[in-house]
Image (cartoon, rainbow, N blue to C red):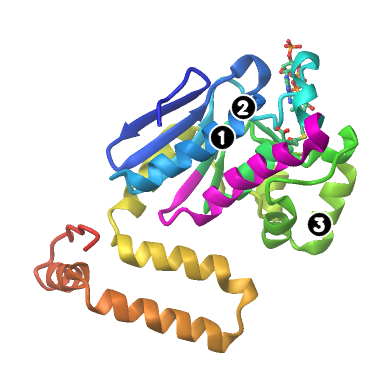
């Protein structure tokens, strides 16, 4: 994956930072941009970095699809079916990645941009973070997994209200209703600190925590117990469990390798 001017990729220790970089358009995604987002996520999956941080340049996080008049034809070309497959592949890649993801929402997150943030495991926001499921105001419907993620964050009734009004939610309300985990003044520092804290833990455990939590609402207790048991058996057989137990006994920090 080659970073472009519109998608910056930087490794900061164990964290892979992906920065949407079209600040003059609040990082709206260009017609060919969804493939770039997907490729960046896939490149993170293949990398040695253990946590991904997704953020935006300038005063926006991501304003969804690029709606500048010259670009809008791509939305409906061929009925828009290919466009939506591309969007779906990017959303699926974010969901399927095996390592933890953090959205650092530095400003407005609109439409698909909002749902891209919600697709991350943890959503941190600056005091300027704002969210809008703006779709219905544009004659559109929720996409990029919003109908999956939003009810999980805020409950079904609030999810419908936000999606049916398209109103803008500020950072304080976002914190209150569960869109944001934290509001922080120094967002990059806090996101990096959290990424490093998570990255210090055992990769195999993190991967199954992520997968099992994501599957939580589709499973019975019996299914959850079965999946947890199978994952724990894998951990039991790992070098990292031996290392974790040894480090505890020796009163030192563990050094996990993912094996
Ligand atoms: O890609 C696909 O085909 C898949 C389909 C995806 C579906 C969607 O994501 S639909 C949702 C599309 N997004 C929107 O409708 C959001 C449009 N933007 C806004 O409603 C507002 O800009 C915001 C609420 C996000 C922020 O408002 P505000 O007042 O803070 O900023 P602004 O002044 O409106 O915008 C600043 C600049 O960014 C402005 O440019 P200018 O006038 O300074 O040259 C504005 O045009 C530009 N901008 C904002 N959003 C977009 C955008 N340019 C292109 N596309 C945008 N989505």
Residue that badge 1 annotates: 35
Q: Is mark 2 within 8 Å of ligand 1?
A: no
* In this rendering, the label closer to the viewer, 3 or 2: 2
Q: Which mark is residue 54?
A: none
Q: Secondary structure at mark 3?
A: helix
Label 1 or label 3, whichever comes before in sequence order:
1
Residue 11 x, y percent position in the rendering: 32, 33
Residue at image coords 32%, 43%: 47
Q: Check the image and name the residue furthest to the bottom.
A: 222
Mark yes or no: residue 171 visible.
no
Q: Quadrant of the N terminus?
A: top left
Residue at image coords 18%, 61%: 254
Residue 73 falls within the magenta-colored stretch: no
Residue that badge 2 annotates: 32
Quarter of the figure with residue 183: top right
Tell me the crowding category of disc 2: few under 14, some 14 to 19, or many 20 or more residues within 10 angstroms, Cα based: few
Dots 1 and 3: beta carbons under 8 Å?
no
Q: Quadrant of the C terminus?
A: bottom left
Residue 225 x, y percent position in the rendering: 48, 85
213 to 188, vertically: above or below: below
Q: Secondary structure at mark 1?
A: helix
Ligand number 1: quarter of image? top right
Report the predominant secondary structure element of the magenta stretch: helix
- Which is nearer the eye, 250 or 64? 64
Magenta residue span:
77-102
Residue 140 x, y percent position in the rendering: 86, 39
Label 3 or label 2, whichever comes before in sequence order:
2
Residue that badge 3 annotates: 158
Could you tell me how far apart the alpha carbons at marks 1 and 3 are, in whole angstroms? 31 Å
* In this rendering, the label closer to the viewer, 1 or 3: 1
């Amino acid at each position: 994956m080659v970073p472009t001017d519109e998608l910056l990729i930087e490794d900061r220790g164990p964290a892979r930072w992906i920065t949407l970089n079209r600040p003059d358009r609040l990082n709206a995604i260009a017609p060919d941009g969804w493939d770039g987002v997907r490729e960046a996520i896939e490149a993170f999956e293949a990398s040695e970095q253990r946590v991904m941080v997704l953020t935006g340049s300038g005063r926006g996080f991501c304003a969804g699809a690029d709606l500048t008049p010259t670009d809008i034809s791509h939305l409906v070309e061929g009925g828009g079916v290919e466009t939506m497959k591309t969007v779906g592949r990017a959303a699926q890649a974010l969901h399927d990645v095996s390592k933890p993801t953090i959205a650092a929402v530095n400003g407005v997150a609109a439409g698909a941009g909002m749902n891209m943030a919600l697709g991350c495991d943890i959503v941190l926001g600056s005091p300027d973070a704002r969210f809008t499921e703006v779709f219905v105001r544009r004659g559109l419907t929720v996409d990029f997994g919003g109908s999956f993620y939003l009810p999980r964050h805020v409950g079904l009734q609030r999810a419908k209200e936000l999606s049916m009004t398209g109103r803008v939610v500020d950072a304080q309300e976002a914190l209150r209703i569960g869109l944001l985990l934290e509001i922080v003044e120094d967002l990059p520092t806090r996101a990096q600190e959290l990424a490093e804290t998570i990255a210090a833990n055992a990769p195999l455990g993190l991967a199954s925590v992520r997968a099992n939590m994501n599957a939580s609402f589709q499973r019975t207790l019996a299914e959850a117990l079965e999946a947890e048991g199978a994952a724990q058996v894998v951990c039991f057989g790992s070098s990292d469990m031996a290392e974790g137990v040894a480090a505890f006994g020796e009163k030192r920090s563990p050094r996990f390798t993912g094996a």
